Amino acid sequence: MTTLSKITFGMAALFTASFSVAVIGAQSKAPEEIKLPTPKPGQYEHKAPTLADIQNDKDLHPELRKVILKGRDLFMNTQQLRGEYVFNDMNCKSCHMGEGRMAWSGPIWPAATTLPDFRGKNGHVNSLEERIAGCFSFSMNGTPPAYGSDTMLALSAYHQYMAKGAKMYDKNIAGRGFGHLGKDIPEATTYANGEKVYQANCAVCHGSDGAGKKFAGEIVYPPLWGDGSYNWGAGMTRIFTAASFIQNNMPLGQPGRLTDQEAWDVALFINSQERPQDPRYTGDAKETREKFMNFHNATVYGTEVNGKILGQHDNTGEKPFLKPEALKPRTFK
């Protein structure tokens, strides 16, 4: 571990400790009430390999091991691609917790076992590389490495190795994605309550302005809105996605502590804040929302919140373009 990494790790521990102190006496659930989701009947579980598994797998050719380890390095520190493919303060691990291995935390290995497949977001069959490209285009507010490039090969290899031993083309996967709370926002969900939950539980790490925390130039906690965060086309802008992610993973070190309703409230609050433009923007947020309603029906993009139409702007954050060339339709005749 480098000196800078040690310092950053220490600061992260300090922030986490400060957070723990801040919430003592204000827990939403008593410890005995905290329960994370369990697999449904018939679902299968997969234990993804660890770093030690990669390092010690005698069946891996040394050159392949290097590629997989490079992919892991890029996954954990995607900021090393800042200004080339990444134009915000996010890393892959920001949304896919636990090195992309953890159930209920967006594990990455299901992508390697279920793709190619049709994807409703872009309306055509996607490869693993294209799925990764989508993360660069939306969550990283950037542009993807070229298909078949060394960088894309490394990231794909890491995804595929995480799936070692998993079933192929079996979608009944326990802990896949972020969706255990369902897709219907409870009627009781409000912006005002979400703001209270955020200030009491999230601001200590992510900042009262949602800008996240940095130390010595390294991101300790990612931003949740603003120019440094995911753009309006990212999957995390969907209220149900954010709510499930938050309920199972946040506050950091205390997953499951928030009630379901608190998770819905704070997800609505966070995703009612401005962020860089959806790369599919037509020039009118309401029109863009209607055009991509299969996605934006779960967001508040293009709707009026606090007297303002969210997403009605030309701001692309640090990115000097709107739409990456990779975002194009594909059809088979």
Image (tube, grey):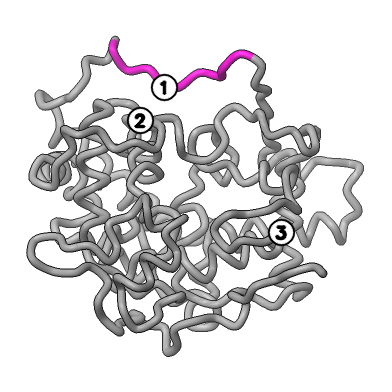
Magenta region: 33-41
Q: Label 1, on which residue?
A: 36
- The image position of residue 8, as x and y in percent, is 37, 57
Q: Label 2, on which residue?
A: 255
**Vertical position of residue 323 compared to residue 13: above or below:** below
Tell me if I can see residue 122 in this picture. Answer: yes
Label 2 with label 3: CB-CB less than 8 Å: no
Indicate which disc residue 125 carries: 3
- Residue 270 shown left or right of residue 68 in the figure: left
Label 1 with label 3: CB-CB less than 8 Å: no
Residue extending farthest bottom = 320
Between the C-alphas of marks 2 and 1, the distance is: 8 Å
Q: Residue at left 18%, top 37%?
A: 189
Q: Main secondary structure of the magenta part?
A: loop
Q: Secondary structure at mark 2?
A: loop
Residue type at the position of mark 3: Val
Q: Residue at left 85%, top 57%?
A: 64
- Residue 8 shown left or right of residue 262 in the figure: right
**Vertical position of residue 231 compared to residue 186: above or below:** below
Residue in front for this viewpoint, 89 or 313: 313
| Residue 34 within the segment the image draws in magenta | yes
Q: Residue at left 45%, top 55%?
A: 235
- Residue 197 shown left or right of residue 118 in the figure: left
- The image position of residue 325, as x and y in percent, is 60, 83
